[in-house]
Amino acid sequence: MTTAGLKSTPGGALRGTVRAPGDKSISHRSMILGALATGTTTIEGLLEGDDVLATARAMQAFGARVEQEGVGRWRVEGKGGFAEPSDVVDCGNAGTGVRLIMGAAAGFAMCATFTGDSSLRGRPMGRVLDPLARMGATWLGRDKGRLPLTLKGGSLRGLVYTLPMASAQVKSAVLLAGLHAEGGVEVIEPEATRDHTERMLRAFGAEVIVEDKNNVRHVRLPEGQKLKGTHVQVPGDPSSAAFPLVAALIVPGSEVTVEGVMLNVLRTGLFTTLQEMGADLVISNVRVESGEEVGDITARHSQLKGVVVPPERAPAMIDEYPILAVAAAFADGPTVMRGIGEMRVKESDRIALTAAGLTACGVTVEEEPEGMTVVGTKGGNHPVRGGGKVITHGDHRIAMSHLILGMAAQEPVEIDEPGMIATSFPGFVSLMTGLGGSIVEA
Ligand SMILES: O=C(O)C1=C[C@@H](OP(=O)(O)O)[C@@H](O)[C@H](O)C1
Ligand SMILES: C=C(OP(=O)(O)O)C(=O)O
Protein backbone atom coordinates (compact mmCIF):
# COMPACT_ATOMS: atom_id res chain seq x y z
CA MET A 1 0.00 0.00 0.00
CA THR A 2 1.33 3.46 -0.91
CA THR A 3 1.69 5.61 2.15
CA ALA A 4 2.49 8.89 0.38
CA GLY A 5 -0.41 10.89 -0.96
CA LEU A 6 -1.21 11.14 -4.66
CA LYS A 7 -1.76 14.15 -6.86
CA SER A 8 -3.32 14.51 -10.26
CA THR A 9 -2.17 17.25 -12.56
CA PRO A 10 -3.91 19.00 -15.42
CA GLY A 11 -2.77 17.67 -18.77
CA GLY A 12 -3.83 16.73 -22.26
CA ALA A 13 -6.84 14.91 -23.54
CA LEU A 14 -7.78 11.44 -22.31
CA ARG A 15 -8.19 8.87 -25.06
CA GLY A 16 -8.68 5.14 -25.31
CA THR A 17 -10.81 2.10 -24.60
CA VAL A 18 -10.77 0.31 -21.25
CA ARG A 19 -12.74 -2.40 -19.45
CA ALA A 20 -14.67 -1.63 -16.31
CA PRO A 21 -13.52 -3.67 -13.28
CA GLY A 22 -15.98 -6.25 -11.98
CA ASP A 23 -19.03 -4.98 -10.13
CA LYS A 24 -18.43 -4.81 -6.40
CA SER A 25 -22.04 -5.53 -5.36
CA ILE A 26 -22.25 -8.63 -7.55
CA SER A 27 -18.76 -9.80 -6.53
CA HIS A 28 -19.67 -9.76 -2.80
CA ARG A 29 -22.93 -11.59 -3.48
CA SER A 30 -21.29 -14.27 -5.65
CA MET A 31 -18.95 -15.16 -2.78
CA ILE A 32 -21.70 -15.18 -0.13
CA LEU A 33 -24.28 -17.13 -2.14
CA GLY A 34 -21.54 -19.49 -3.34
CA ALA A 35 -20.67 -20.25 0.30
CA LEU A 36 -24.34 -20.69 1.30
CA ALA A 37 -25.06 -23.00 -1.64
CA THR A 38 -24.42 -26.68 -2.01
CA GLY A 39 -21.76 -27.55 -4.57
CA THR A 40 -19.42 -25.58 -6.79
CA THR A 41 -19.77 -21.95 -7.81
CA THR A 42 -17.38 -20.63 -10.43
CA ILE A 43 -16.96 -16.89 -10.74
CA GLU A 44 -15.47 -14.98 -13.66
CA GLY A 45 -14.61 -11.28 -13.64
CA LEU A 46 -14.64 -11.02 -9.83
CA LEU A 47 -13.54 -7.63 -8.53
CA GLU A 48 -10.35 -8.39 -6.64
CA GLY A 49 -10.66 -5.29 -4.52
CA ASP A 50 -9.92 -5.29 -0.80
CA ASP A 51 -13.63 -5.26 0.15
CA VAL A 52 -14.42 -8.38 -1.85
CA LEU A 53 -11.23 -10.14 -0.72
CA ALA A 54 -12.33 -9.54 2.89
CA THR A 55 -15.66 -11.19 2.04
CA ALA A 56 -13.82 -14.12 0.44
CA ARG A 57 -11.79 -14.60 3.63
CA ALA A 58 -14.97 -14.34 5.70
CA MET A 59 -16.58 -17.10 3.62
CA GLN A 60 -13.58 -19.32 4.38
CA ALA A 61 -14.02 -18.51 8.06
CA PHE A 62 -17.65 -19.69 7.78
CA GLY A 63 -16.50 -23.00 6.32
CA ALA A 64 -16.53 -22.63 2.52
CA ARG A 65 -13.54 -23.53 0.35
CA VAL A 66 -12.59 -20.46 -1.68
CA GLU A 67 -9.84 -20.61 -4.28
CA GLN A 68 -8.48 -18.25 -6.89
CA GLU A 69 -7.96 -20.02 -10.21
CA GLY A 70 -6.72 -17.09 -12.31
CA VAL A 71 -7.17 -13.34 -12.66
CA GLY A 72 -10.80 -12.69 -11.69
CA ARG A 73 -11.52 -16.44 -11.78
CA TRP A 74 -12.58 -17.99 -8.47
CA ARG A 75 -14.13 -21.23 -7.27
CA VAL A 76 -16.27 -21.50 -4.14
CA GLU A 77 -17.19 -24.89 -2.71
CA GLY A 78 -20.26 -24.27 -0.56
CA LYS A 79 -21.34 -26.56 2.24
CA GLY A 80 -25.02 -25.64 1.99
CA GLY A 81 -24.73 -23.46 5.09
CA PHE A 82 -22.38 -21.64 7.45
CA ALA A 83 -20.26 -23.23 10.19
CA GLU A 84 -19.27 -21.27 13.30
CA PRO A 85 -16.09 -19.24 12.72
CA SER A 86 -13.35 -19.89 15.25
CA ASP A 87 -12.17 -16.28 15.34
CA VAL A 88 -13.40 -12.72 14.85
CA VAL A 89 -14.53 -12.06 11.26
CA ASP A 90 -12.89 -8.89 9.95
CA CYS A 91 -14.82 -7.37 7.04
CA GLY A 92 -12.32 -4.56 6.48
CA ASN A 93 -13.89 -1.45 4.96
CA ALA A 94 -16.93 -3.16 3.46
CA GLY A 95 -20.43 -2.18 4.57
CA THR A 96 -21.91 -4.47 1.93
CA GLY A 97 -19.74 -7.38 3.09
CA VAL A 98 -20.53 -7.19 6.79
CA ARG A 99 -24.24 -6.39 6.46
CA LEU A 100 -24.96 -9.18 3.97
CA ILE A 101 -22.84 -11.69 5.88
CA MET A 102 -24.59 -10.86 9.17
CA GLY A 103 -27.93 -11.50 7.45
CA ALA A 104 -26.73 -14.82 6.08
CA ALA A 105 -25.13 -15.86 9.39
CA ALA A 106 -28.29 -15.10 11.38
CA GLY A 107 -29.92 -18.14 9.82
CA PHE A 108 -27.63 -20.54 11.66
CA ALA A 109 -27.48 -21.64 15.31
CA MET A 110 -24.04 -20.26 16.11
CA CYS A 111 -22.15 -17.24 17.36
CA ALA A 112 -20.09 -14.99 15.12
CA THR A 113 -18.19 -11.86 16.09
CA PHE A 114 -17.72 -9.20 13.42
CA THR A 115 -15.40 -6.24 13.16
CA GLY A 116 -13.92 -3.99 10.50
CA ASP A 117 -11.59 -1.05 9.99
CA SER A 118 -12.08 2.25 11.81
CA SER A 119 -14.52 3.51 9.17
CA LEU A 120 -16.68 0.36 9.28
CA ARG A 121 -16.63 0.38 13.09
CA GLY A 122 -18.24 3.82 12.96
CA ARG A 123 -21.06 2.86 10.58
CA PRO A 124 -24.63 2.06 11.69
CA MET A 125 -25.39 -1.66 11.91
CA GLY A 126 -28.71 -1.22 13.79
CA ARG A 127 -30.47 -0.98 10.42
CA VAL A 128 -29.63 -4.65 9.85
CA LEU A 129 -29.70 -5.83 13.47
CA ASP A 130 -33.25 -4.50 14.05
CA PRO A 131 -34.95 -6.72 11.46
CA LEU A 132 -32.68 -9.66 12.33
CA ALA A 133 -33.63 -9.29 16.02
CA ARG A 134 -37.32 -9.24 15.05
CA MET A 135 -36.69 -12.57 13.34
CA GLY A 136 -35.20 -13.96 16.56
CA ALA A 137 -31.45 -13.35 16.28
CA THR A 138 -29.69 -11.81 19.28
CA TRP A 139 -26.62 -9.60 19.38
CA LEU A 140 -24.32 -7.81 21.72
CA GLY A 141 -22.27 -4.91 20.52
CA ARG A 142 -21.28 -1.31 21.05
CA ASP A 143 -23.71 1.58 21.32
CA LYS A 144 -26.27 1.63 18.46
CA GLY A 145 -24.97 -1.68 17.18
CA ARG A 146 -21.55 -0.44 16.12
CA LEU A 147 -18.89 -3.07 15.43
CA PRO A 148 -17.33 -5.08 16.94
CA LEU A 149 -20.45 -7.07 17.73
CA THR A 150 -21.42 -10.67 18.27
CA LEU A 151 -24.45 -12.16 16.58
CA LYS A 152 -26.20 -15.34 17.62
CA GLY A 153 -28.61 -16.83 15.11
CA GLY A 154 -30.77 -19.84 14.40
CA SER A 155 -34.49 -20.76 14.69
CA LEU A 156 -35.56 -17.60 12.88
CA ARG A 157 -39.17 -16.54 12.46
CA GLY A 158 -40.41 -15.12 9.16
CA LEU A 159 -40.82 -11.36 8.76
CA VAL A 160 -42.65 -8.84 6.63
CA TYR A 161 -40.39 -5.81 6.73
CA THR A 162 -40.79 -2.33 5.27
CA LEU A 163 -37.39 -0.74 4.71
CA PRO A 164 -37.10 2.46 6.77
CA MET A 165 -34.40 3.73 4.39
CA ALA A 166 -33.56 2.94 0.76
CA SER A 167 -30.86 0.32 1.36
CA ALA A 168 -30.11 -2.71 -0.77
CA GLN A 169 -27.79 -3.90 2.00
CA VAL A 170 -30.64 -4.05 4.53
CA LYS A 171 -33.00 -5.66 1.99
CA SER A 172 -30.33 -8.24 1.18
CA ALA A 173 -29.57 -9.02 4.83
CA VAL A 174 -33.26 -9.78 5.47
CA LEU A 175 -33.54 -11.91 2.32
CA LEU A 176 -30.42 -13.91 3.18
CA ALA A 177 -31.64 -14.47 6.76
CA GLY A 178 -34.99 -15.45 5.21
CA LEU A 179 -33.36 -18.46 3.55
CA HIS A 180 -33.52 -20.11 6.98
CA ALA A 181 -36.61 -18.49 8.51
CA GLU A 182 -39.87 -20.26 9.21
CA GLY A 183 -42.45 -18.88 6.81
CA GLY A 184 -39.92 -17.01 4.67
CA VAL A 185 -39.65 -13.22 4.43
CA GLU A 186 -41.10 -10.31 2.53
CA VAL A 187 -39.27 -6.99 2.12
CA ILE A 188 -41.30 -3.94 1.11
CA GLU A 189 -39.30 -1.22 -0.59
CA PRO A 190 -40.94 2.21 -0.80
CA GLU A 191 -38.01 3.21 -3.06
CA ALA A 192 -36.57 0.49 -5.30
CA THR A 193 -32.91 -0.33 -4.64
CA ARG A 194 -30.41 -2.43 -6.58
CA ASP A 195 -31.85 -5.91 -7.11
CA HIS A 196 -28.70 -8.00 -7.47
CA THR A 197 -29.55 -10.24 -4.49
CA GLU A 198 -32.96 -11.10 -5.93
CA ARG A 199 -31.47 -11.85 -9.35
CA MET A 200 -28.63 -13.91 -7.97
CA LEU A 201 -30.85 -15.89 -5.56
CA ARG A 202 -32.85 -16.93 -8.63
CA ALA A 203 -29.67 -17.86 -10.50
CA PHE A 204 -28.79 -20.13 -7.55
CA GLY A 205 -32.19 -21.84 -7.85
CA ALA A 206 -34.32 -19.98 -5.28
CA GLU A 207 -37.84 -18.74 -5.88
CA VAL A 208 -38.09 -14.97 -5.40
CA ILE A 209 -41.41 -13.27 -6.07
CA VAL A 210 -41.29 -9.57 -6.89
CA GLU A 211 -44.54 -7.63 -7.14
CA ASP A 212 -45.19 -3.99 -7.82
CA LYS A 213 -48.12 -2.77 -5.72
CA ASN A 214 -48.95 0.92 -6.26
CA ASN A 215 -45.33 1.63 -7.23
CA VAL A 216 -43.97 -0.11 -4.15
CA ARG A 217 -41.83 -3.21 -4.64
CA HIS A 218 -42.65 -6.27 -2.55
CA VAL A 219 -39.89 -8.89 -2.59
CA ARG A 220 -40.93 -12.26 -1.19
CA LEU A 221 -38.76 -15.26 -0.48
CA PRO A 222 -40.94 -18.26 0.40
CA GLU A 223 -39.81 -20.66 3.10
CA GLY A 224 -37.43 -23.52 2.40
CA GLN A 225 -35.37 -22.28 -0.57
CA LYS A 226 -32.27 -24.31 -1.33
CA LEU A 227 -29.31 -22.82 -3.20
CA LYS A 228 -27.27 -24.79 -5.71
CA GLY A 229 -23.82 -23.67 -6.90
CA THR A 230 -23.75 -22.06 -10.33
CA HIS A 231 -21.56 -19.97 -12.64
CA VAL A 232 -21.47 -16.20 -12.16
CA GLN A 233 -20.15 -13.85 -14.83
CA VAL A 234 -19.55 -10.53 -13.06
CA PRO A 235 -20.40 -7.51 -15.24
CA GLY A 236 -18.40 -4.26 -15.20
CA ASP A 237 -19.10 -1.88 -12.33
CA PRO A 238 -20.99 1.29 -13.36
CA SER A 239 -19.85 2.96 -10.13
CA SER A 240 -16.20 2.50 -11.20
CA ALA A 241 -16.82 3.23 -14.90
CA ALA A 242 -18.11 6.61 -13.71
CA PHE A 243 -14.56 7.89 -13.04
CA PRO A 244 -12.97 7.58 -16.52
CA LEU A 245 -16.27 8.60 -18.15
CA VAL A 246 -16.63 11.81 -16.11
CA ALA A 247 -12.92 12.50 -16.66
CA ALA A 248 -13.50 12.37 -20.44
CA LEU A 249 -16.48 14.73 -20.13
CA ILE A 250 -14.50 17.42 -18.29
CA VAL A 251 -11.01 17.23 -19.87
CA PRO A 252 -11.07 19.08 -23.22
CA GLY A 253 -10.48 16.99 -26.35
CA SER A 254 -11.12 13.66 -24.61
CA GLU A 255 -12.88 10.56 -25.89
CA VAL A 256 -12.98 7.44 -23.72
CA THR A 257 -14.89 4.17 -24.11
CA VAL A 258 -15.52 1.88 -21.17
CA GLU A 259 -16.54 -1.61 -22.23
CA GLY A 260 -18.78 -4.11 -20.48
CA VAL A 261 -20.55 -1.73 -18.08
CA MET A 262 -23.60 -3.12 -16.28
CA LEU A 263 -26.71 -1.17 -17.31
CA ASN A 264 -29.18 -2.38 -14.65
CA VAL A 265 -31.55 0.62 -14.37
CA LEU A 266 -31.30 0.48 -10.58
CA ARG A 267 -27.61 1.47 -11.00
CA THR A 268 -27.51 3.89 -13.93
CA GLY A 269 -28.86 7.09 -12.37
CA LEU A 270 -25.54 8.87 -12.92
CA PHE A 271 -25.51 8.23 -16.67
CA THR A 272 -29.11 9.49 -16.98
CA THR A 273 -28.21 12.61 -15.00
CA LEU A 274 -25.08 13.29 -17.06
CA GLN A 275 -27.14 12.99 -20.26
CA GLU A 276 -29.62 15.51 -18.83
CA MET A 277 -26.64 17.80 -18.21
CA GLY A 278 -25.83 17.62 -21.92
CA ALA A 279 -23.09 14.99 -21.77
CA ASP A 280 -22.10 13.33 -25.03
CA LEU A 281 -22.47 9.82 -23.63
CA VAL A 282 -23.26 7.07 -26.10
CA ILE A 283 -24.21 3.54 -25.08
CA SER A 284 -23.60 0.81 -27.66
CA ASN A 285 -23.28 -2.95 -28.08
CA VAL A 286 -25.97 -3.62 -25.46
CA ARG A 287 -26.25 -7.33 -24.60
CA VAL A 288 -27.29 -9.56 -21.69
CA GLU A 289 -24.64 -11.44 -19.72
CA SER A 290 -25.56 -13.67 -16.77
CA GLY A 291 -28.96 -12.03 -16.45
CA GLU A 292 -27.67 -8.42 -16.41
CA GLU A 293 -27.75 -5.96 -19.32
CA VAL A 294 -24.27 -4.66 -20.17
CA GLY A 295 -22.99 -2.27 -22.81
CA ASP A 296 -20.07 -0.11 -23.88
CA ILE A 297 -20.21 3.58 -22.99
CA THR A 298 -18.33 6.29 -24.89
CA ALA A 299 -17.90 9.74 -23.37
CA ARG A 300 -16.62 12.78 -25.27
CA HIS A 301 -15.68 16.13 -23.76
CA SER A 302 -18.89 18.14 -23.35
CA GLN A 303 -20.01 21.50 -22.08
CA LEU A 304 -22.30 20.45 -19.27
CA LYS A 305 -25.15 22.47 -17.76
CA GLY A 306 -26.35 22.37 -14.18
CA VAL A 307 -29.53 20.39 -13.40
CA VAL A 308 -31.80 19.51 -10.50
CA VAL A 309 -31.31 15.80 -9.83
CA PRO A 310 -34.66 14.19 -8.93
CA PRO A 311 -34.36 12.99 -5.29
CA GLU A 312 -36.12 9.72 -6.15
CA ARG A 313 -33.16 8.85 -8.37
CA ALA A 314 -30.79 8.71 -5.38
CA PRO A 315 -30.85 4.92 -4.79
CA ALA A 316 -29.83 4.35 -8.43
CA MET A 317 -26.70 6.48 -8.04
CA ILE A 318 -26.03 6.79 -4.31
CA ASP A 319 -22.28 6.06 -4.62
CA GLU A 320 -21.91 8.36 -7.63
CA TYR A 321 -22.76 11.75 -6.10
CA PRO A 322 -19.12 12.64 -5.30
CA ILE A 323 -18.10 12.19 -8.96
CA LEU A 324 -21.33 13.86 -10.13
CA ALA A 325 -20.39 16.82 -7.93
CA VAL A 326 -17.04 16.99 -9.77
CA ALA A 327 -18.81 16.99 -13.15
CA ALA A 328 -21.17 19.66 -11.78
CA ALA A 329 -18.19 21.87 -10.84
CA PHE A 330 -17.40 22.20 -14.57
CA ALA A 331 -21.00 22.80 -15.64
CA ASP A 332 -22.81 25.99 -16.50
CA GLY A 333 -24.96 26.87 -13.47
CA PRO A 334 -25.86 25.10 -10.25
CA THR A 335 -26.55 21.39 -9.86
CA VAL A 336 -28.96 20.62 -7.03
CA MET A 337 -28.74 17.24 -5.31
CA ARG A 338 -31.34 16.39 -2.65
CA GLY A 339 -32.62 13.31 -0.83
CA ILE A 340 -29.08 12.05 -0.33
CA GLY A 341 -28.88 11.88 3.47
CA GLU A 342 -27.66 8.25 3.14
CA MET A 343 -24.38 9.68 1.84
CA ARG A 344 -23.57 10.79 5.37
CA VAL A 345 -23.33 7.17 6.63
CA LYS A 346 -21.04 5.71 3.98
CA GLU A 347 -17.28 5.15 4.40
CA SER A 348 -17.22 8.83 5.39
CA ASP A 349 -19.75 11.64 5.59
CA ARG A 350 -19.64 12.05 1.83
CA ILE A 351 -21.71 15.23 1.70
CA ALA A 352 -19.33 16.95 4.11
CA LEU A 353 -16.16 15.64 2.44
CA THR A 354 -17.32 16.38 -1.10
CA ALA A 355 -18.23 19.91 -0.05
CA ALA A 356 -14.90 20.38 1.76
CA GLY A 357 -12.84 18.94 -1.12
CA LEU A 358 -14.53 21.00 -3.80
CA THR A 359 -14.37 24.14 -1.67
CA ALA A 360 -10.61 23.57 -1.22
CA CYS A 361 -10.42 23.51 -5.04
CA GLY A 362 -12.19 26.86 -5.41
CA VAL A 363 -15.69 25.55 -6.18
CA THR A 364 -18.77 26.98 -4.45
CA VAL A 365 -20.82 24.31 -2.66
CA GLU A 366 -23.86 24.82 -0.46
CA GLU A 367 -24.27 21.97 1.97
CA GLU A 368 -27.69 20.95 3.35
CA PRO A 369 -28.56 18.29 5.94
CA GLU A 370 -29.67 15.89 3.19
CA GLY A 371 -28.29 17.50 0.07
CA MET A 372 -25.84 19.84 -1.60
CA THR A 373 -25.72 22.29 -4.46
CA VAL A 374 -22.58 22.66 -6.56
CA VAL A 375 -22.26 25.93 -8.42
CA GLY A 376 -20.64 25.16 -11.76
CA THR A 377 -17.83 27.39 -13.00
CA LYS A 378 -18.73 26.99 -16.68
CA GLY A 379 -15.65 25.23 -17.97
CA GLY A 380 -13.32 27.48 -19.98
CA ASN A 381 -14.96 30.78 -19.00
CA HIS A 382 -14.31 30.45 -15.27
CA PRO A 383 -12.13 27.36 -14.97
CA VAL A 384 -12.07 25.32 -11.79
CA ARG A 385 -8.95 26.33 -9.86
CA GLY A 386 -8.06 23.03 -8.21
CA GLY A 387 -5.00 23.17 -5.97
CA GLY A 388 -6.74 21.58 -2.98
CA LYS A 389 -5.22 19.16 -0.49
CA VAL A 390 -8.16 16.86 0.03
CA ILE A 391 -8.73 14.94 3.25
CA THR A 392 -10.47 11.68 2.30
CA HIS A 393 -10.94 10.05 5.73
CA GLY A 394 -9.99 6.83 3.95
CA ASP A 395 -12.93 7.06 1.54
CA HIS A 396 -12.07 5.57 -1.87
CA ARG A 397 -14.78 7.44 -3.77
CA ILE A 398 -13.80 10.80 -2.30
CA ALA A 399 -10.17 10.06 -3.29
CA MET A 400 -10.91 9.04 -6.87
CA SER A 401 -13.40 11.87 -7.47
CA HIS A 402 -10.91 14.55 -6.50
CA LEU A 403 -8.09 12.97 -8.51
CA ILE A 404 -10.38 13.22 -11.55
CA LEU A 405 -11.09 16.86 -10.74
CA GLY A 406 -7.35 17.59 -10.74
CA MET A 407 -7.02 16.34 -14.34
CA ALA A 408 -9.30 19.12 -15.58
CA ALA A 409 -8.48 21.93 -13.12
CA GLN A 410 -5.83 24.65 -13.41
CA GLU A 411 -3.70 23.38 -10.51
CA PRO A 412 -2.89 19.86 -9.26
CA VAL A 413 -5.14 18.25 -6.64
CA GLU A 414 -3.69 16.16 -3.83
CA ILE A 415 -5.35 13.39 -1.82
CA ASP A 416 -4.24 11.48 1.28
CA GLU A 417 -4.62 7.73 1.95
CA PRO A 418 -4.48 6.53 -1.68
CA GLY A 419 -4.22 2.89 -0.54
CA MET A 420 -7.97 2.92 0.17
CA ILE A 421 -8.72 3.21 -3.56
CA ALA A 422 -8.01 -0.53 -3.73
CA THR A 423 -11.18 -1.28 -1.77
CA SER A 424 -13.27 -0.88 -4.93
CA PHE A 425 -10.94 -0.06 -7.87
CA PRO A 426 -7.43 -1.47 -7.44
CA GLY A 427 -6.43 -0.64 -11.05
CA PHE A 428 -7.69 2.96 -10.93
CA VAL A 429 -4.34 4.76 -11.16
CA SER A 430 -2.94 2.61 -13.97
CA LEU A 431 -6.24 2.74 -15.89
CA MET A 432 -6.39 6.54 -15.70
CA THR A 433 -2.70 7.04 -16.54
CA GLY A 434 -3.11 4.57 -19.45
CA LEU A 435 -5.77 6.91 -20.85
CA GLY A 436 -3.31 9.81 -20.64
CA GLY A 437 -4.13 11.17 -17.19
CA SER A 438 -1.35 12.25 -14.88
CA ILE A 439 -1.38 10.85 -11.32
CA VAL A 440 1.88 10.89 -9.35
CA GLU A 441 3.04 10.61 -5.74
CA ALA A 442 2.47 13.85 -3.85
O1 LIG B 1 -26.03 -3.60 -1.79
C1 LIG B 1 -24.97 -3.15 -2.22
O2 LIG B 1 -24.13 -3.86 -2.84
C2 LIG B 1 -24.66 -1.73 -1.99
C3 LIG B 1 -25.68 -0.89 -1.59
C4 LIG B 1 -25.47 0.54 -1.32
O3 LIG B 1 -25.49 0.72 0.09
P1 LIG B 1 -26.86 0.89 0.92
O4 LIG B 1 -27.59 -0.37 0.92
O5 LIG B 1 -26.40 1.28 2.31
O6 LIG B 1 -27.61 2.00 0.24
C5 LIG B 1 -24.14 1.06 -1.86
O7 LIG B 1 -23.86 2.30 -1.28
C6 LIG B 1 -23.01 0.11 -1.63
O8 LIG B 1 -21.81 0.59 -2.21
C7 LIG B 1 -23.29 -1.24 -2.25
C1 LIG C 1 -20.69 2.69 0.14
C2 LIG C 1 -19.86 1.87 -0.45
O1 LIG C 1 -19.56 0.60 -0.05
P1 LIG C 1 -19.91 -0.20 1.28
O2 LIG C 1 -21.21 0.30 1.83
O3 LIG C 1 -19.96 -1.62 0.84
O4 LIG C 1 -18.76 0.02 2.22
C3 LIG C 1 -19.16 2.28 -1.70
O5 LIG C 1 -18.48 1.42 -2.29
O6 LIG C 1 -19.24 3.44 -2.15
Image (cartoon, rainbow, N blue to C red):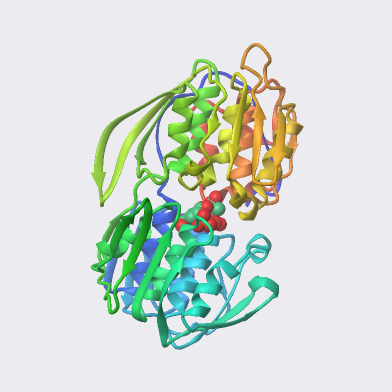
- Viewer-nearest residue: 193 or 281: 193
Viewer-nearest residue: 194 or 131: 131
In the rendered image of this protein, does residue 223 appear above or below residue 319?
Answer: below
**Which residue appears at 75% of the width and 36% of the height?**
389
Q: Viewer-proximal residue, 15 or 184?
A: 184
Q: How many marks?
A: 0
Residue 353, how many percent across, how many down?
A: 70, 43
Query: Furthest residue to the front?
Result: 214
Residue 330 placed where, x, y %?
61, 23
In the depicted structure, whether residue 320 falls above or below residue 119: above
Placement of the C terminus among the 4 image quadrants: top right
In this view, the residue in front, 288 or 143, is 143
Does 410 sit left or right of 50 as displayed?
right
- Note whether residue 360 is visible: yes
Would you say 373 lies left or right of 427 here? right
Q: Is residue 49 left or right of residue 117?
A: left
